Amino acid sequence: MKALLNSLSETELALFRETEREQLTGADEDDLVELHGRVRRARDKYVGLYRREASARVATSGGRGKARPKNLHNAQKAEVFEDALARVSRHLAAAARRSAQELKSERLAAAQEMRNTAPPTVRTRPAAKRATPTRAAKKTAPAGRASPGAGQAARKRQAASAATGARQQGRRDSR
């Protein structure tokens, strides 16, 4: 592994060092997303190189097994960046979980705060200024009429019936 790390270019080695545990612990989620993208591009580069060169050498070498040792360097580089990508992915997942937990707790705290507000108080008039019901108001409705809320209930039933009919007609029309 040490020999392979020594064979990396300076930029590749710098990228690999960014994925070490000490570097990843202080990074925030946005930095980890950016680093994840760069490491994935490096891994994809060497995986692609390995596959292209291996497939080109198959014809000259006489088989995949004979072509593999000549292309080992690209395969090892791809493996190094695959391990680095796995480290970054684990740290990114942990950062995303922390972020989600923080957002959830903020949302719940805001909902709890909204729920715990006291209802508005109703102001009442002093007892002396209250109107006393008259004898006419105490009377019940005439014999031919139902209670005062009956009209409202009838309107509600009629609206519900109309809505049901509209839904049924909509289903028929959509056929």
Image (cartoon, rainbow, N blue to C red):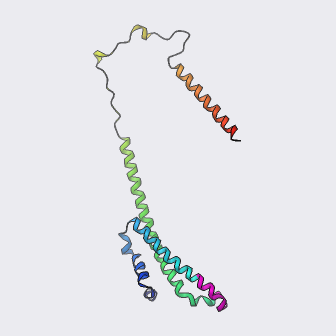
* Image spot of residue 83 (x, y percent): 48, 77
For the image, the number of numbered tags is 0
Which residue is at 56% across, 83% downward?
Answer: 50
* Image spot of residue 41 (x, y percent): 50, 75
In this view of the protein, which residue sits in the foreground, 86 or 60? 60
In this view of the protein, which residue sits in the foreground, 59 or 106? 59
In this view of the protein, which residue sits in the foreground, 121 or 171? 171
In the rendered structure, the answer to whether residue 148 lies left or right of residue 124 reads: right
In the rendered structure, the answer to whether residue 64 lies left or right of residue 9 reads: right
Is 62 inside the magenta-drawn segment? yes
Q: Which residues are magenta?
A: 51-64
- In which quarter of the view is residue 33 placed? bottom left
Which residue is at 43% across, 71% downward?
Answer: 35
Q: Is residue 90 above or below residue 102?
A: below
Q: Residue furthest top?
A: 135
Q: Residue furthest front?
A: 173
Magenta stretch, overall SS: helix
* Image spot of residue 76 (x, y percent): 51, 84
- In which quarter of the view is residue 122 placed? top left
* Image spot of residue 157 (x, y percent): 58, 26
The image quadrant where one finds the C terminus is top right
Q: Is residue 62 above or below residue 119?
A: below
Q: Residue furthest right?
A: 175
